[in-house]
Image: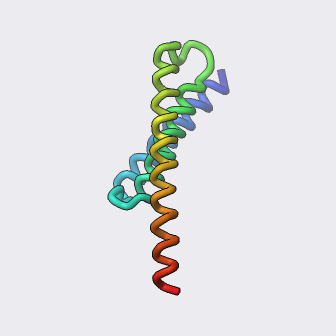
Amino acid sequence: MAETGHNVRAADVLADVLAEVRERVDRREALGEAQVAVLEAAVNIVRAGQPGFEVMPVERSELVREALGAVRAATVATGVALTYVHRTARVLT
């Protein structure tokens, strides 16, 4: 039971961090979008990993699917951010 409580608390903490990041980062920039996407994935993965009957199998499947989509989005956004940083570095040197 302690682990269930831990996962719930972890998901709540991550959700709070996600909300704060959404308020503070510029999602028009690739790096900001990557930050949000990584946190969305983390929230969904932790919620999907709640043991016992906290999460029904269909809901767990949806959470994992959403996490995978967020990881894909983070990968693309991080790649775009890296390309931008490299281009900027070449211009400045």
Furthest-bottom residue in this view: 93
Q: Nearer the viewer, residue 44 or 68?
A: 68
Left/right placement of residue 78 relative to residue 27 reads: right
Where residue 5 sits in the image (x, y, percent)?
59, 27
Figure check: 67 above or below 29: above
Furthest-right residue in this view: 2
| Residue at 66% over, 27% down | 3
Left/right placement of residue 11 relative to residue 20 reads: right
Where residue 93 sits in the image (x, y, percent)?
53, 86
Figure check: 52 above or below 91: above
| Residue at 56% over, 13% down | 53
Q: Nearer the viewer, residue 42 or 51?
A: 42
Q: How many marks?
A: 0
Q: Nearer the viewer, residue 18 or 64?
A: 64
Where residue 54 sits in the image (x, y, percent)?
53, 17
Q: What is the quadrant of the N terminus in the image?
A: top right
| Residue at 51% over, 63% down | 82
Figure check: 14 above or below 61: below
Q: Nearer the viewer, residue 39 or 9?
A: 39
Where residue 15 sits in the image (x, y, percent)?
45, 41
| Residue at 50% over, 37% down | 43
Scheme of colours in the image: rainbow
Left/right placement of residue 57 relative to residue 30 reads: right
